[in-house]
Amino acid sequence: MKKILLFIFIAFKSLAQDAEYIKTQDTLYLLLEETAQLKVQKFTKFTLQSSSSTSLNFYEFSEAPSKQLTIWTQEDGKFPDKKLNRIVKRKDFLKTNKSKIIDADFIDTIGVTDFLFTILKLNETKRVIYVLNKRDLKKRKILLKKAKFSIVGYAEM
């Protein structure tokens, strides 16, 4: 039993530990928890606030009051002509993209500043970022939601 728990722990911790590899990818996946109500999680280097409405999900990474990154996703129903989201089979997806998945613990090791400017490289328009819900990892299919960056308020005050 201990070996199985250790294996599960290592599998989730090693989702995306190679920052150099991640920097070279044109598609990245953020593993975040989608919640119906406002949820605040405190990490060592930042605070993550997440909330959802009927068609929008917000994720705010804050290192300090003046250093914030807000990521949002939306459902396809509002804009049927623009397919923002994809449904993929969990087993196939994890097999091919395991090393491209970034979780909040990984962001905590490098900090929001490095995540924003080194990993995401928001100035590169080719980069596509999807958000996947942690709860979907237990299902047969995963919904990938294309991320948009609504506010990048990142100024020293």
Image (cartoon, rainbow, N blue to C red):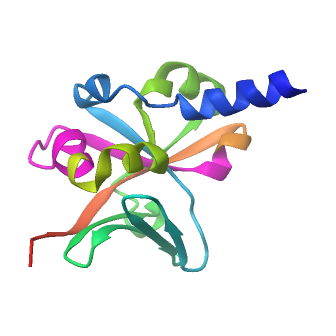
Q: Residue at x 60, y 34 (%)?
A: 12
Residue 131: x %, y % from top left: 44, 50
Question: Which image quarter is the N terminus in?
Answer: top right
Residue 150: x %, y % from top left: 24, 69
Q: In this view, does 127 lie above or below 17?
A: below
Q: Can residue 2 be seen in this view?
A: yes
Residue closest to the eye, 89 or 123: 123
Q: Is residue 129 above or below residue 7?
A: below
Residue positioned most to the right: 1
Q: Can residue 55 be seen in this view?
A: no
Q: What stretch is highlighted in magenta?
A: 115-136
Q: Residue at x 29, y 59 (%)?
A: 148
Residue 43: in magenta span: no
Q: In this view, does 7 lie above or below 90?
A: above
Residue closest to the eye, 137 or 83: 137
Residue positioned most to the front: 44
The part of the image, by quadrant, that contains residue 37 is bottom right
Q: Residue at x 30, y 51 (%)?
A: 111
Left or right: 97 as drawn, with respect to 61: right
Left or right: 92 as drawn, with respect to 73: right
Residue 131: in magenta span: yes
Residue 127: x %, y % from top left: 22, 39
Question: Which image quarter is the C terminus in?
Answer: bottom left
Residue closest to the eye, 157 or 119: 157
Number of on-image labels = 0
Q: Which residue is drawn at 9% across and 48% down?
A: 123
Q: Is residue 102 above or below residue 100?
A: below
